[in-house]
Amino acid sequence: MVNELSSSTRKVQEVLQTRGLSFRVVELPASTRTAREAAEAIGCQVGQIAKSLVFKGKHTGKPLLVIASGANRVDEAKVAELVGEPIEKADADFVRQRTGFAIGGVPPVGHSVPLQTWIDEDLLKHQAIWDAACGVRTETNRLT
């Protein structure tokens, strides 16, 4: 694991500390572009990887964050039904403007604007989960 944190990762660590959470953010030297690569680098199951995906409401333009288990694919039709409007994948500029982070590096916290957030309940099956974007190990009992 890398000792020096990038500015984006430092930002997430500061947000967690400000909220009174004692999680430690880490950056890994190995590739973590996919949930499988992240799980291999960490040494955990793919299902323990939480991936943060940003969508956009087609009518309202509102940003929507889906935090999904690395073992699952997001069913966009089900998400659209839950939010009450069709959704689309957000482009890189939209993601950067709304979250302050680049696609592939969006953490679950510390966004530029508040995001309506949906969390895959399969993540709650695990004692610990890791966020793919920022290497935060989370004890799931703290999320409930």
Image: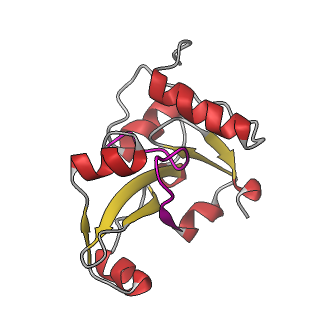
- Relative to 41, say whether 53 is above or below: below
The reply, left or right, for residue 91 in relation to residue 44 is left
How far from the left and from the top, in percent, is residue 140? 70, 55
How far from the left and from the top, in percent, is residue 59? 26, 79
Q: Nearer the viewer, residue 81 or 61?
A: 61
**The magenta segment:** 104-118
Rendering quarter of residue 64: bottom left
Judge whether residue 112 is colored magenta.
yes
How far from the left and from the top, in percent, is residue 110? 54, 44
Q: Nearer the viewer, residue 91 or 144?
A: 91
**Magenta region's main secondary structure?**
loop
Query: Which color scheme does this rendered protein use?
Result: secondary structure
How far from the left and from the top, in percent, is residue 10? 55, 25
The reply, left or right, for residue 80 in relation to residue 141 is left
Q: For the image shown, how many numbered marks are present on the structure?
A: 0
- Residue at x 46% of width, y 40% of height: 39
- Relative to 4, say whether 57 is above or below: below
- Residue at x 23% of width, y 47% of height: 92
Q: Quadrant of the C terminus?
A: bottom right
Judge whether residue 116 is colored magenta.
yes
The reply, left or right, for residue 51 in relation to residue 21 is left
- Relative to 62, say whether 140 is above or below: above
- Relative to 128, say whether 6 is above or below: above
Q: Nearer the viewer, residue 94 or 66?
A: 94
- Residue at x 39% of width, y 46% of height: 35
Residue, far top: 3
- Residue at x 41% of width, y 81% of height: 83
